[in-house]
Amino acid sequence: MPKLSIIIPCYYSEKNLPSTTAELLENESRFPGDITFEYIMVDDGSKDNTLELLKSFKEAHPDKVTIVKLSGNFGSYNAIQAGMKHATGEMNIVITDDLQDPPEIMLQMVDYWKKGFKLVIANRNEREDAFINRFFAIMFQKMIKRFALTNMPKGGFDYCLFDKKLREEVVELNESNTNSLYLLLWLKYDFVSIPYTRRKRVIGKSRWTVSKKIKLFIDSFVSFSYFPLRLITISGLFLGLISFVYAAYVIFARLSGLISVQGWTTMMVVFLLVSAFQMMALGIIGEYLWRNLDLSRKRPPYIVEEVI
């Protein structure tokens, strides 16, 4: 009988877990009897009662629950990698712990897997979020699709099913400072999308802060696109062309006597513009170099303190 491993990263989830685990268990009744279930619950360094609730869940269902406790907060995508490494199912699903992604879609995902699809993505067609959150999420996904992963489905995703083979390949990559789920797209396997409406969060408080969103944005670009480096080259050529044209104009104006070239204000404007560009370029190059340094150290993207 095929096994379905459901991987759930948990971070300050004490308010969500009772209803989340109950809904997941109830969702099992929608499946035929030839599917077995495994829950990989990853505690990403929570400092509340998340671990205690996970242990209670484990005690109630000892044969189907595995708890992976990380030594600290390594981020949700590294926690997902940890869950992948400890999953054992032929099928694997990643879902959040806040019930914004409807578990009932899992049955449709499994049906596609049985038809031969190794990757099934539930893409966010609509969002029941605040306008500002929807706006920035849409812009982020459009930029990723345009400049990094052209096969990104509309609306992006965090909720997906993937085959054991894909799971093993992502685990073997063992990348840090990346989006683990986007690596599934990078593998270039054919996939099918299931559009859905992402629910509004009604329980608990999101720990997905602005700084974490910015880091994800940078990681996603640097990990999957060389566009920022190409942009530096294009901008440098453009500024060089402007400088050449302006220099030619100044020389011509000086020799022809059309203007008396003072130059202080213009020189300062050009100097500040070029300096700002250079600092931006160094910052972008530094992001790439720092990731190369981080990979050369071969530090793991997460540390597992305990597996229960």
Image (cartoon, rainbow, N blue to C red):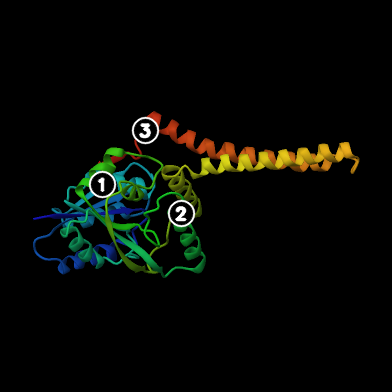
Q: Please state which amino acid type lies under the numbered disc 3.
A: Arg
Q: Please state which amino acid type lies under the numbered disc 2.
A: Arg
Rendered position, 109 above or below 47: below
Q: CA distance from mark 2 to mark 3?
A: 31 Å
Q: Which mark is residue 146?
A: 2
Q: Quadrant of residue 208?
A: bottom left
The local secondary structure at tag 1 comes to helix
Pick whichever of labels 2 and 3 is earlier in the sequence: 2
Q: Residue at x 46, y 46 (%)?
A: 221
Q: Residues within 10 Å of mark 3 (few under 14, many from 20)?
A: few
Query: In the rendering, at what x and y percent does residue 121 appear?
Result: 30, 59
Work out whether residue 2 can be spotted: yes
Of badges 2 and 3, nearer the viewer stands 2
Rendered position, 33 above or below 64: below
Look at mark 1 in the image and give the residue it sits on: 84
The local secondary structure at tag 2 comes to helix
Q: Which mark is residue 295?
A: none
Look at mark 3 in the image and give the residue it sits on: 299
| Closer to the camera in the image, 34 or 184 | 184
Q: Residues within 10 Å of mark 2 (few under 14, many from 20)?
A: few
